[in-house]
Structures are given as structure tokens and as C-alpha cells.
Image (cartoon, grey):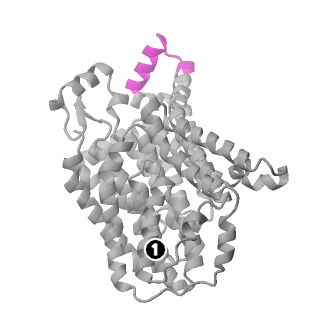
């Protein structure tokens, strides 16, 4: 039955990877894969419980069950699903809150406050301005939203489509690099942060320089290739100013970015999960939008309300994350991921190589399931080791090596261990190697109709140079900032 579970996952994964040729939305494939895997687990619970015997014994102990029956086995599977669903829900509520805040800013034309102030025609100067704005905006918002905003800006600034493609390619690299070092900049980094694998302050400190190098290397190369001025699109500056003056645009931009940036601070102060801080920010934004437009009637106020923003968010993406995370946790509950981790550890051994392999693989397949699988493959010590052993390890630094402790021959990793930081970087930036390797790339591909082969010829090598340069920088600076 273990092989059947793996087969369902592989088929579902291939359906997600080949979404466009199959013409089947990846959300449908993810949801079917997740539900079918837990169905297999439930139907074949006896065989799969034998594989997961330690967890089953712990379940019996906690529930004070002395007699094992079919009902008990069924209850164990539903207990496992409910346990994982709690962590998954935190990620989904976080994403829903973040997406709604961004939509509220956009509906008030808040981003125009930034974009309308770019007036240069020099191609190299414009390339640097666009890339740097994308890099830092992606860290505050997310790489998908930022890439959409910046490509919309490029259409207003550059009329020549061929010239605009190079800028769009750099937007993809900058958005992915900017999202990697921020706990709220990329879904995969957010997953690691919410899961407890990394902390906000440490991931910013350790990854901002490698991520910046990942952007700077291709940026410097293109700066030498580009010459002259860009051909500006026909654009009415007076009309742009009118758009910027939508009531509350500046207030909503400041409040929205402030709400997003406050989330890590809120978690540090209150020790509540990050999604609570995000929902707090959404509540404040909702209230501000209601106050700003309180003098309008219901029909005039509708486009600027949070209710309207909720109707515009990408719900299919949220359901995709739900499906794929549910599927990954089925593999985790049956100890399949643990077996894969042990095999990789024996076959490859070097964690740097493993992390970089995960990053390069993310350019072919979605990085969300890859990181979710990694989180299951390399168990977190605080969640997996009993408190007595964990406290003993924390009190004895000699037991810790590269953020890892070994208990009964099994490796467990502490928060802010090197493996988590490096995976956050590689999974976040590796997707830039191919245009289909990241959400930002897929969005830009659709908006600008960039051909897969064109991107591979013109941008992929630059993205890989940046990826490896940033990885090298991380390996050099890690000993300086290492927690362990």
C-alpha cells in the first residue's frame, strides 16, 4: 500500500508539473491528489500503521487506549489528518489575509504613488531602478503580486516589446530574490517561518546579502548589454496624477505596507502565530477603508471595500496550497518522507548539495510541495524529540552540530539550522532558472507572452549565475551569522 500511496502522489505531481500541456488546472490535480492519498491511508490503515508504528503507539498512550480495534485505527488516521490540518490552516489564513491587504492597496491605486514617480528614459538606470524596487517590494508583499505590479508599470514605461522582455526577465529574478530573504516575501519562506524552522530576524540577517548578490550578478551583466534610452509608451502624465489622487491612496499604501511589516514584530511581542498578526493587519485595513469612504453611498463605496477585495483574490492558489500540503502530510504521516531523507543523506550526504538540488528542481516543478516535502523529510527537533532530550541538547552545545542533534541514530534539526536557511534561499531563487519555475515567472509569461525558449536563451543562464553566486556567498557568510 505504501507503493500505491507513492504512485498517487507521483501521478498527481506530474499532473501539476504538466498543467499547461494537459490543460488541467493544477488546483484540481492538487485537491484530488491530497484527498485520494488520505483515502488510501484510511482504507489501508493497517498496513500503513505498521510503517508508522511509533506514532501509533504514542497516539494510544495519549488517548489511554489499551485495545486496538478497527475503530481505533480509523480514529488514528483522522487524528493525524486533524493534527496536520491545524498547521496547514495557519498558512492558508496567512495567505488569505496578505492577499486581501494587497488587493485593498491596489483597489485604492496605492501602488501608483510609487510607480508614477519614475520618469527616467535611460535604459540602464531604469533597469536598476525597476530591479531594486522589485527586490524590496517583493520582500514586503510577495513575489507574485510584485511581479504583476511591476510588469504593469513596464507597460507604461517601455513601448518596445523586445526591450520590455529583458526588463520583465529581470523582474522575475528580482521578485524571487527579494522574496527569499523575507518571512512574508515568498510562500516557501513563509511556510518555513510559520512551521518554526526559521525565525524572522535571522532569515533576514543571513539571506539578504546572498539574495542581493543573486540579483546583482545578472543586473551588472545586462547593464553592459543595454545602451541608450528606452522607447516610452504613449502616456498621459496628467491622467496618471489624477489616478494617484484616488481618495486614500497614500494612506492605504502606508497602512498596508505597515500592516505587512508589522506581522513579524507582532509575533515577536505576543508569541502568537503569524496569521494572527496578518488578520490583525487586515482588520485595521478594513476599518480604515470603511472610514475613508464613509461619505459615499453603497454603490460608490463597493470597489474600495474589503468585501470586494476578497472577491478578487486568487482563491484557486489558496486551494492549490491546501491540496498539495494535505498530500505532503500524508507522506509524512506514513514515514515515507523520513525514508527519502535517510536515502538522500546516505546517497548525497552533503546538506549544501541537497539544498541546491532542491533549488534547481524548483525551476522544473513547483517549489511549494518541494519545501513542504523538505519540512517533512528533515524533522524539527522541538516538535519531534521529547522535551527531556531536547532540553538536554539545548543545555549542551557539544550535542549540536550545524543546528542538528542525533537521537537513536536519527537526525533532528533545530530552528534556524543551516539546512532551513539554505533551502529558503535555494527554493526561493532557483525557480528563476526557467520561466515556468515560479509563480512570478508564470504570471509574467502570461502577461507579456514571453516564449519559454526565448527566456531559456536570454535569461536562464543569468539567473543560474546569480543563483550559484548567491549560494556561494551564503556558504561564506553563514559561519559569521550562524546561530549554532
Secondary structure of the magenta portion, mostly?
helix
Up-down relation of residue 265 to residue 476 (above or below)? above
Percent x, y of residue 400:
20, 34
Residue 426 visible in the snapshot: yes
What residue appears at the point 48 percent right and 31 percent down from the top-left corner?
272
Q: Could you say which quadrant of the image residue 333 lies in? A: top left
Residue 320 visible in the snapshot: no
According to the picture, the residue beneath numbered tag 1 turns out to be: 169
Element under disc 1: helix
Pick out the residue farthest to the left: 398
Up-down relation of residue 308 to residue 387 (above or below)? below
Percent x, y of residue 437:
46, 64
Q: Residues within 10 Å of mark 1 (few under 14, many from 20)?
A: many
Of 269 and 483, the residue lying toward us: 269
Percent x, y of residue 127:
43, 76
Q: Is residue 71 magenta?
A: yes
What residue appears at the point 27 percent right and 45 percent down from the top-left corner?
418
Q: Could you say which quadrant of the image residue 161 lies in? A: bottom right
Specify the segment rendered in magenta. 53-72
What residue appears at the point 51 percent right and 24 percent down from the top-left corner?
76
What residue appears at the point 59 percent right and 77 percent down from the top-left corner?
156
Up-down relation of residue 81 to residue 347 (above or below)? above
Amino acid at each position: 500500500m505504501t507503493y500505491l500511496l507513492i504512485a498517487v502522489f507521483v501521478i498527481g505531481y506530474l499532473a501539476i508539473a504538466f498543467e499547461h500541456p494537459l490543460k488541467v488546472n493544477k488546483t484540481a490535480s492538487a485537491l484530488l491528489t491530497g484527498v485520494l492519498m488520505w483515502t488510501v491511508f484510511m482504507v489501508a490503515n493497517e498496513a500503513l500503521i505498521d510503517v508508522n508504528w511509533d506514532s501509533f503507539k504514542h497516539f494510544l498512550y495519549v488517548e489511554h487506549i489499551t485495545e486496538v480495534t478497527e475503530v481505533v485505527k480509523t480514529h488514528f488516521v483522522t487524528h493525524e489528518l486533524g493534527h496536520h490540518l491545524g498547521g496547514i490552516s495557519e498558512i492558508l489564513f496567512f495567505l488569505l489575509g496578505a492577499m486581501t491587504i494587497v488587493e485593498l492597496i491596489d483597489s485604492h491605486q496605492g501602488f501608483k504613488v510609487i510607480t508614477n514617480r519614475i520618469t527616467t528614459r535611460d535604459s540602464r538606470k531604469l533597469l536598476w531602478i525597476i530591479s531594486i524596487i522589485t527586490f524590496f517590494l517583493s520582500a514586503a508583499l510577495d513575489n507574485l503580486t510584485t511581479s504583476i505590479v511591476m510588469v504593469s508599470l513596464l507597460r507604461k514605461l517601455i513601448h518596445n516589446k523586445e526591450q520590455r522582455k529583458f526588463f520583465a526577465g529581470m523582474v522575475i529574478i528580482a521578485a524571487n530574490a527579494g522574496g527569499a530573504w523575507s518571512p512574508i516575501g515568498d510562500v516557501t519562506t513563509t511556510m518555513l517561518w510559520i512551521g518554526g524552522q526559521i525565525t524572522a530576524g535571522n532569515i533576514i540577517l543571513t539571506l539578504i546579502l546572498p539574495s542581493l548578490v543573486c540579483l546583482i550578478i545578472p543586473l551588472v551583466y545586462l547593464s553592459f548589454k543595454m545602451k541608450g534610452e528606452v522607447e516610452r509608451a504613449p502616456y498621459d502624465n496628467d491622467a496618471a496624477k489624477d489616478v494617484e489622487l484616488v481618495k486614500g491612496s497614500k494612506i492605504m499604501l502606508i497602512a498596508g505596507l505597515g500592516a505587512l511589516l508589522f506581522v513579524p514584530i507582532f509575533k515577536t511581542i505576543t508569541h502568537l502565530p503569524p496569521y494572527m498578526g496578518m488578520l490583525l493587519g487586515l482588520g485595521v485595513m478594513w476599518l480604515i477603508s470603511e472610514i475613508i469612504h464613509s461619505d459615499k453611498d453603497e454603490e460608490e463605496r463597493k470597489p474600495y471595500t474589503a468585501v470586494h477585495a476578497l472577491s478578487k483574490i486568487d482563491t484557486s492558489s489558496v486551494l492549490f496550497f491546501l491540496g498539495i500540503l494535505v498530500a505532503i502530510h500524508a507522506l509524512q504521516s506514513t514515514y515515507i518522507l523520513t525514508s527519502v531523507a535517510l536515502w538522500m543523506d546516505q546517497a548525497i550526504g552533503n546538506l549544501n548539495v541537497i539544498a541546491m538540488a532542491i533549488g534547481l528542481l524548483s525551476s522544473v516543478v513547483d517549489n511549494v510541495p518541494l519545501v513542504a516535502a523538505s519540512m517533512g523529510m528533515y524533522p524539527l527537533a522541538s516538535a519531534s524529540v521529547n522535551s527531556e532530550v531536547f532540553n538536554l541538547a539545548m543545555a549542551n552545545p557539544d550535542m549540536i552540530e550545524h543546528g542538528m542533534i542525533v537521537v537513536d541514530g536519527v537526525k533532528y534539526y533545530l530552528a534556524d539550522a543551516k539546512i532551513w536557511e539554505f533551502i529558503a534561499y535555494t527554493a526561493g531563487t532557483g525557480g528563476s532558472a526557467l520561466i515556468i519555475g515560479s509563480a512570478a515567472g508564470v504570471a509574467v509569461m502570461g502577461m507579456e507572452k514571453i516564449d519559454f525558449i526565448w527566456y531559456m536563451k536570454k535569461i536562464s543562464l543569468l539567473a543560474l549565475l546569480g543563483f550559484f553566486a548567491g549560494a556561494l556567498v551564503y556558504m561564506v557568510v553563514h559561519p559569521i551569522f550562524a546561530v549554532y
